[in-house]
């Protein structure tokens, strides 16, 4: 399927990622450098980090697969990503950067504690670790599907190989290593899809006329995925931007409030056309590769079949780049929670910078291993990722809004709201086969978010009433 030059291009690319991670290791002097790049990241690099992190396995590999079976309705996943990115930049980013500068936050749960209390920080930490393990697991599953097809390996072996590469350069290089690798990966993704992928799809029957002539009418139904799936998925994704620690981390790392605000907006505008191109390729593959049946990795099969020698290897590197650039920041984010919010906060508050740096690297390796196990268990990329989005959105939305906008809130209401949302989402997922076939239970977001909101609002009102009564009582 591939020529020698293609294998050489891919091997060089994977080796380069590890080399960058090793070189970046020399620049690590403190946890602030390891997790935030010294808080001096400029607009261009921060935009690349946003773009490369969100154009990953689900955005490309899984969207092409969905478009192969559903048509244009598959565009909803990436559309929600682009919209969420833009809204975060418009509404949240500058505020988050301002708070980070005032308090020198390193992680998202620190912000939560500043508004509420330590126990709410702990539940925010647990929720963030679980969700980012899911995000990383989804990307590793997508990368393993690509490697398995290319090298004719079992999924398990491909997953082990992929995890080894991603975890190695992430654990060693930290934020600076990721920034350097994501520049390479973002350029491969963006220019590879626009200037190579789309023209080749067009030349192999991917024209609007051919689509209308040869594809079933259902492929042009924007709601073909099913609105019961589309609405909670899109809402989970958009809301998760406002509670996902990687977004907060990028704001902390920005050199200024203006940089923190501009970068996600620009990235969101760049993300939107990527979804259209992924759907275009998927619909082209229906006609060009009718025998694949949509099984496995359609995007990789399309590249292997129609791309010329040399460009095959380059485009496949672009696919892997999309996946790995998302997996790395997810692993690093969860690692920050383990190191700063659990180890330093609860176990070793007086640990030295060198000790914390060593623990950070070990935590990155551990998170990568756990994400790999999750990928091995679930395998469906979008299902894994949506689970992560839902956990975050249901458990942490209201406490985060209160913290960022600095509204007056009660710690008890925040804590029990987050606990309720987390437990309900996990329970719904665990007991999914036994739940009634009602639209409310079609997605864990609805019961999870509803129960969290009811808990938060009820306790908030009760505590405010109690506080008012206490204040009014004569001395």
Image (cartoon, helix red, strand yellow):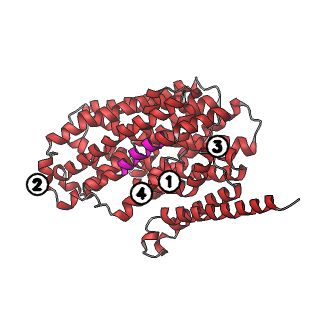
Residue holding disc 2: 213
Q: Is the magenta stretch mostly helix, strand or loop?
A: helix
**Which of disc 2 and disc 1 is earlier in sequence?**
2
**Which of disc 4 and disc 3 is earlier in sequence?**
3
| Res. 100 image quadrant | top right
Dot 4 and dot 2 residues touching (CB under 8 Å):
no
Question: Element under label 1?
Answer: helix
Question: Element under label 4?
Answer: helix
Residue pictured at 34% horizontal, 40% vertical? 319
Instruction: Provide the residue span drawn in magenta.
Output: 77-89
Calculate the distance from the C-alpha at mark 1 to the C-alpha at mark 4: 11 Å
Between tags 1 and 4, which lies in front? 4
* Residue 332 in picture, x, y percent from top left: 55, 39
Q: Is residue 299 left or right of residue 39?
A: left
Vertical comparison of 429 with 299: above or below: below
The N terminus lies in quadrant: top left
**Which of disc 2 and disc 4 is earlier in sequence?**
2
Calculate the distance from the C-alpha at mark 3 to the C-alpha at mark 2: 55 Å
Between tags 1 and 3, which lies in front? 3
Calculate the distance from the C-alpha at mark 4 to the C-alpha at mark 2: 31 Å
Calculate the distance from the C-alpha at mark 3 to the C-alpha at mark 4: 27 Å
Between tags 3 and 4, which lies in front? 3
Residue holding disc 1: 388
* Residue 69 in picture, x, y percent from top left: 26, 58
Residue holding disc 4: 233
* Residue 167 in picture, x, y percent from top left: 51, 39
Question: Element under label 2?
Answer: helix
Q: In this view, does 355 lie to the left or right of 82?
A: right
Residue 218 counted in the magenta span: no
* Residue 67 in picture, x, y percent from top left: 27, 53
Residue pictured at 19% horizontal, 51% vertical? 289
């Amino acid at each position: 399927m591939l020529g020698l030059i293609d294998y050489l291009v891919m091997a060089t690319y994977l080796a380069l990622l590890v080399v960058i991670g090793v070189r970046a290791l020399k620049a690590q002097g403190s946890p602030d450098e390891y997790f935030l790049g010294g808080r001096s990241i400029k607009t261009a690099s921060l935009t690349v980090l946003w773009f490369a992190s969100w154009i990953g396995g689900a955005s490309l590999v899984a969207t092409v697969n969905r478009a192969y079976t559903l048509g244009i309705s598959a565009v909803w996943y990436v559309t929600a990503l682009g919209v969420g990115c833009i809204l975060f930049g418009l509404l949240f980013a500058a505020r988050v950067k301002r708070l980070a500068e005032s308090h020198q936050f390193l992680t998202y749960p620190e912000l939560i504690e500043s508004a509420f209390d330590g126990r709410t920080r702990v539940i925010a930490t647990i929720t963030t670790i679980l969700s980012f393990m899911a995000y990383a697991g989804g990307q590793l599953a997508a990368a393993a599907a690509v490697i398995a097809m290319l090298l004719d390996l079992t999924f398990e072996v491909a997953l082990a190989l992929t995890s080894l590469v991603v975890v190695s350069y992430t654990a060693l290089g930290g934020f600076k290593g990721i920034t350097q690798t994501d520049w390479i990966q973002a350029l491969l993704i963006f220019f590879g899809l626009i200037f190579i992928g789309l023209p080749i799809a067009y030349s192999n029957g991917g024209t609007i006329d051919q689509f209308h002539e040869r594809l079933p009418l259902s492929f042009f139904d924007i709601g073909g995925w099913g609105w019961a799936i589309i609405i909670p998925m899109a809402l989970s994704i958009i809301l998760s931007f406002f509670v996902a620690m990687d977004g907060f981390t990028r704001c902390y790392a920005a050199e200024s409030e203006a940089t923190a605000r501009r970068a996600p907006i620009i990235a969101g505008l760049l993300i939107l056309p990527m979804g259209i191109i992924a759907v275009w390729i998927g619909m082209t593959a229906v006609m060009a590769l009718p025998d694949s049946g949509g099984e496995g990795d359609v995007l990789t099969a399309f590249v292997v079949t129609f791309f010329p020698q040399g460009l095959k290897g380059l485009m496949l590197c672009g696919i892997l780049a999309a996946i790995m650039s998302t997996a790395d920041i997810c692993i690093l984010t969860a690692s920050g929670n383990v190191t700063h919010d659990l180890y330093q906060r609860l176990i070793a508050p007086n640990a030295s910078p060198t000790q914390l740096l060593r623990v950070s690297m070990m935590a990155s390796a551990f998170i990568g291993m756990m994400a790999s196990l999750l990928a091995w268990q679930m395998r469906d990329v979008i299902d894994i990722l949506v689970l992560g989005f839902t956990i975050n959105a249901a458990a942490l939305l209201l406490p985060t809004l209160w913290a960022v906008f600095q509204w007056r809130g009660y710690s008890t209401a925040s804590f029990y709201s987050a606990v309720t949302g987390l437990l309900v989402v996990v329970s719904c997922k665990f007991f999914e086969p036994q739940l009634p076939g009602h639209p409310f239970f079609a997605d864990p977001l609805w019961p999870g978010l509803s129960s969290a909101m009811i808990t938060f609002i009820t306790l908030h009102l009760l505590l405010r009433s109690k506080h008012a009564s206490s204040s009014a009582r004569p001395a």
